[in-house]
Amino acid sequence: MTETDPIQRFTALYARHHNQVFAYAVTRAGRDLADEVVAETFLVAWRRFAVLPRGAPLPWLLGTARNVIRETLR
């Protein structure tokens, strides 16, 4: 495995799930906060990439987005 493998995998993860996480953020936090929620969600995903579920990461991403929204709206 090369050093670019995690970057390529993360880029593919982002491309595959960005729209779904964004739609979730818009419906839960509004369009004004959606970009911030998505950015923070994928930042957490990058930091915890080693423990992110590979088979089905979307539920994990949406749970993280929910937590980001909760913290943002506090």
Image (cartoon, grey):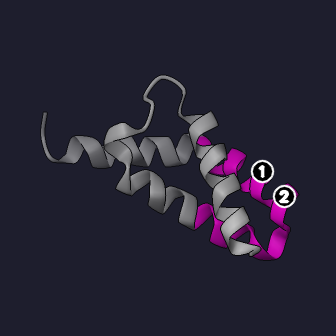
Is label 2 in a helix, a strand or a loop? helix
Residue at the outermost top position: 55
Q: Which residue in the protein does label 1 denote? A: 24
C-alpha span from label 2 to label 1: 6 Å
Residue at the outermost front position: 74
Q: Which residue in the protein does label 2 denote? A: 28
Residue pictured at 44% horizontal, 41% vertical:
12
- The kind of residue tagged 2 is Arg
Q: Which residues are magenta?
A: 17-39
Residue 21 located within the stretch drawn in magenta:
yes
- The kind of residue tagged 1 is Tyr
Marks 2 and 1 in Cβ contact (< 8 Å): yes
Q: Number of callouts in the render?
A: 2
The quadrant in which residue 9 appears is top left
Is label 1 in a helix, a strand or a loop? helix
Q: Which quadrant is home to the N terminus?
A: top left
Residue 55 place in picture, x, y as percent: 48, 22
